[in-house]
Image: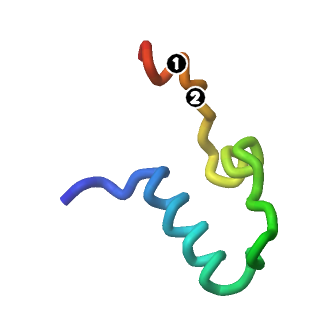
Amino acid sequence: MPAYTKKQQLIDTLTKRIESGEYQPGAKLPSGTELCAQFGVYARSSDQQSTG
């Protein structure tokens, strides 16, 4: 069984927040910086992803 990744945790959490109405239609979602802080991860730039 694959590990439950931070990416999957983020997807599941955002999905639940949208479905519960916490994020209203048309409202902005948290920024990447805010999400990284909430989930304790660091953002990777596209340059890093393509080379690393």
**Residue 24: quarter of image:** bottom right
Q: Residues within 10 Å of mark 2 (few under 14, many from 20)?
A: few
Hey, what amino acid is under mark 2?
Arg
Q: Are marks 2 and 1 in contact (CB under 8 Å)?
A: yes
Can you identify the residue that label 2 sits on?
Answer: 44
Secondary structure of the residue carrying numbered label 2: loop
Q: Report the front residue among 1 and 46.
A: 46
Against 11, residue 35 (above or below) is above
Residue at point 79% right, 62% down? 28
Hey, what amino acid is under mark 1?
Gln
Residue at point 63% right, 46% down? 40
**Residue 33: quarter of image:** top right
Can you identify the residue that label 1 sits on?
Answer: 48
Q: Residues within 10 Å of mark 1 (few under 14, many from 20)?
A: few
Position in image of residue 15 (x %, y %)? 55, 72
Which residue in the rendered view is the most extreme toward the bottom? 20
Residue at point 50% right, 68% down? 12
Left or right: residue 26 compared with residue 41: right
